Image: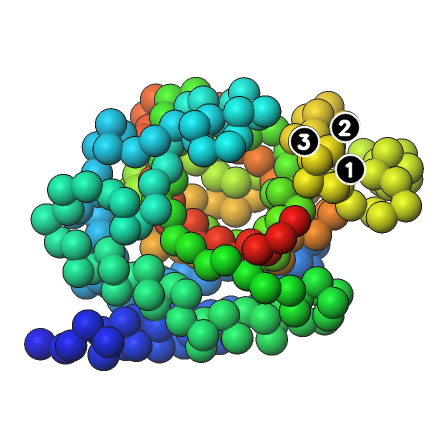
Amino acid sequence: MSSPATLSTQIAGHITNSIARNSLVKEPFPYLITDNALPPDIFARLIADLPAISDLRPMSQIGLRNVAQYDKHVTALFEDIPGRRDPDVWAQVARALLDMSVENLLREIFSPFVPVARDRRDLIREVRLDCGQVGAFLEPHTDSPVVLMKSLLHLSPETSHPTADTVLFRPKDPEARRKRLGERGDFSPASYAHESAGDQAEAARVKFRPNRMWSFFRTADSLHGLDPLAEEVAPRYIVAAHYRFVHA
């Protein structure tokens, strides 16, 4: 049996090999889709050990109270999920997703689109399990300005349904939006908010497929969201690897 360090290294190697087989998509903003992100046996172990919704915390309790639709989303850091039958796989997946080989490859792929000064600030790195319940949705948003980069790994359900997909948006009036954002061309942490769906046009979708990961650097244009989640595909579990700034 592989030691924990060796197992996480093997998983990280699988992730980087999977990433390297895919190409960056540049519209409506740069993002990368990676299918078969985890080794099949590791992915199966995660799926077999998913926690109950009651084991996770409402996102409205972790500093997201200003966005009401987060009330139907629950979350927990991997290390805080209680009662796992297979805790080792959770620890090793988290370690692999945050391995420097994975991070450095993503940085290299996205480097033409990220200001160097922003990229070099100190980061907090964490892996969370997020879950959307029936009716959970997200208005178009770019993610908080404290986010540098994020990777979202689809876990379950296995059933395909449009409401499980992530919707990518393009502003209907880019010039009006630029004026609203101001000279920085971006939100400040204090003023950041989700945007009106009526001001955006659907540009693409990241279809929900188990063991598919999609990654992006947060920019002023990285608009994405979720339609209200249908009952037949709830709950919707994803792994979220966050890279966020220590200081806003």
Category of crowding for the residue at label 3, using alpha-carbon neighbours closer than 10 angstroms: few (below 14), some (14–19), many (at least 20): some
Residue 94: x, y in percent?
A: 33, 60
What's the residue type where badge 3 is placed?
A: Ala
For the residues carrying marks 2 and 3, which lies nearer the camera in this image?
Answer: 3
Mark drawn on residue 218:
none
What's the residue type where badge 1 is placed?
A: Pro
SS at mark 1 in the image: strand
Instruction: Say which of 69 and 210 sits in front.
Output: 69
Q: Which residue is mark 1?
A: 171
Which residue is rendered at x = 34% and y = 46% of the image?
A: 77
Query: Along the polypeptide, which appears first: circle 2 or circle 1?
Result: 1
**Image quarter for residue 121?**
bottom right
Residue 1: x, y in percent?
A: 9, 76
Mark drawn on residue 193:
3
* 19 lies left or right of 52: right
Residue 137: x, y in percent?
A: 50, 27
